[in-house]
Amino acid sequence: MRLIAENLGGERGGETVFSGIGFALEKGEALIVTGPNGSGKSTLLRVIAGLLPVAKGFVRVEAGGEAFPTIASASHYLGHLNAMKTALSVEENLGFWRAFQGEPALSVEEALETVGLGGLGHLPFGYLSTGQKRRASIAKLLVSRRPVWLLDEPTAGLDKASEERFAGLMRDHCQEGGIIVAATHLPLGLEGAKALQMKVAV
Amino acid sequence: MSSLFLRDIRLSIRAGGGALIGVIFFLAVIATIPFGVGPDLNLLSRIGPAILWIAALLACLLGLDRLFQADREDGSLDLLVLNSDRQMLALTVLVKCLAHWAGSVLPLVVAAPLLGLFMNMEPTGIGATAFTLLVGTPAITFIGAAGAAVAVALPRGGLLISVLVLPLTIPVLIFGVSASYGAVADPAPFLQPFLILAALTLFLAVVGPLAAALALRHGTD
């Protein structure tokens, strides 16, 4: 599995946000996208995921096999929003995404244990603190299998211990042959990751 | 897909879901009509099916703006679109429509016979109106889904959706009311308008979700 972007350009509302982005990630590799506010990190992730149209160039996965022919089918996208319903319990939320996204991996309880929320699954999602919500959202990455993780500020709101736990999860994912593209301001604790520095378009 | 249906049904029942708002609006409209029209029982029973249909139509439109907006605000919509290679987006929309109908519109159909008594309608008229509502209201939801998808990015799109959708629902209203009349008034036919109503629902069950899926796919930002 390979994730390749060449001369990639993205725009928002007709304005070019970035252009000429290129990278090639083999399996097991990670790319850390950094840059000041407004440099297009989130836009880049949304363009890669296919949630925004590609303005120039291309991005694609190669050798994804039958299960993951396109980027959209091969990707987990963790955006700023947690994509969970406040009125439903954490278990119900994760159970829904596990069934809907297909390719089930960990069970809901195992995933909650892994992110340190064991025993809190019965609570409504709205009762959790900001950091716990983020951790529940990270558990969403674990309940179904996807080789590519697209992470937008994944550690926002997490405490030190959770950050380290999440760094461990990302290392495990890479060791199993996964690919990570993460936009962040904070060091994520991923050794040997490639770096991409975005600049504000003039 | 069944998990999506269950999730949306749960959401509509739980606090803040708004499943009952439509029924209360429906009740309010129907209970007001006899005061406005006056105590002419024959007149009330004659206009009964039409009033029930109009009130049900407006109550249907009431909750439509939240169909996709709630999912957009918490980021779920991105993941629903992202997963469209595995779960076809039009099918996702169809399931959301069915869940919305079962959660918010079906209570209207259940309440309609009771409210028919307010309008001094005969038992056959009440039965026919409830039956045509049961068959016709899904069509309104399917058209509404397309409107809701177009207006999903607008913060106060509720009224806009109603204005967009209302002209398109007129055929459903016409055939629904004429079938209801057909069951009571003798020379008027019941079966023909009823079959056209059923055909409208089936047709819109395909066209509505497809149009909504197209709008959602191009509406992500």
Image (cartoon, rainbow, N blue to C red):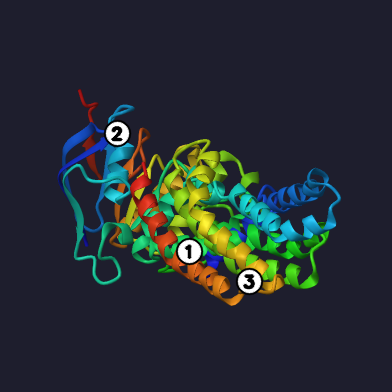
Q: CA distance from mark 1 to mark 2?
A: 30 Å
Instruction: Mark yes or no: residue A178 visible.
Output: yes
Task: Please state if A135 lies on the left or on the right of B128 as rendered.
Answer: left
How far apart marks 2 and 3 lie (CA) works out to: 55 Å
Give coordinates of residue B208: x percent, y percent.
Answer: 44, 59
Q: Earlier in the sequence, mark 1 or mark 3?
A: 1
Task: Check disc 3 and give the amino acid type.
Answer: Ala
| Element under disc 2 | loop
Q: Quadrant of residue A155?
A: top left
Residue assigned mark 1: B94
Mark 2 — residue? A13
Badge 3 sits on which subunit?
Answer: B
Using the numbered discs, state the Cα–Cα distance from disc 1 to disc 3 in whole angstroms.
34 Å
Structural crowding at the residue carrying mark 2, measured as other residues with C-alpha within 10 Å and reported as few (<14), some (14–19) or many (≥20): few
Amino acid type of the residue that numbered disc 2 sits on in the rendered structure: Gly
Q: Work out whether disc 1 and disc 3 sit on a shared chain.
A: yes
Q: Position of residue A142 (x, y in %)?
A: 44, 59
Q: Residues within 10 Å of mark 3 (few under 14, many from 20)?
A: some
Q: State which quarter of the image contains the C terminus of chain B.
A: top left
Q: Is residue A14 above or below residue B93?
A: above
In the rendered image, residue A76, in percent from the top left (x then y), is placed at 37, 55
User: Which mark, by number, is residue B74?
Assistant: none
- In this rendering, which labeled residue sits more in front, label 2 or label 3? 3
Foreground residue among B147 and A174: B147
Name the disc covering residue B188, or none: 3
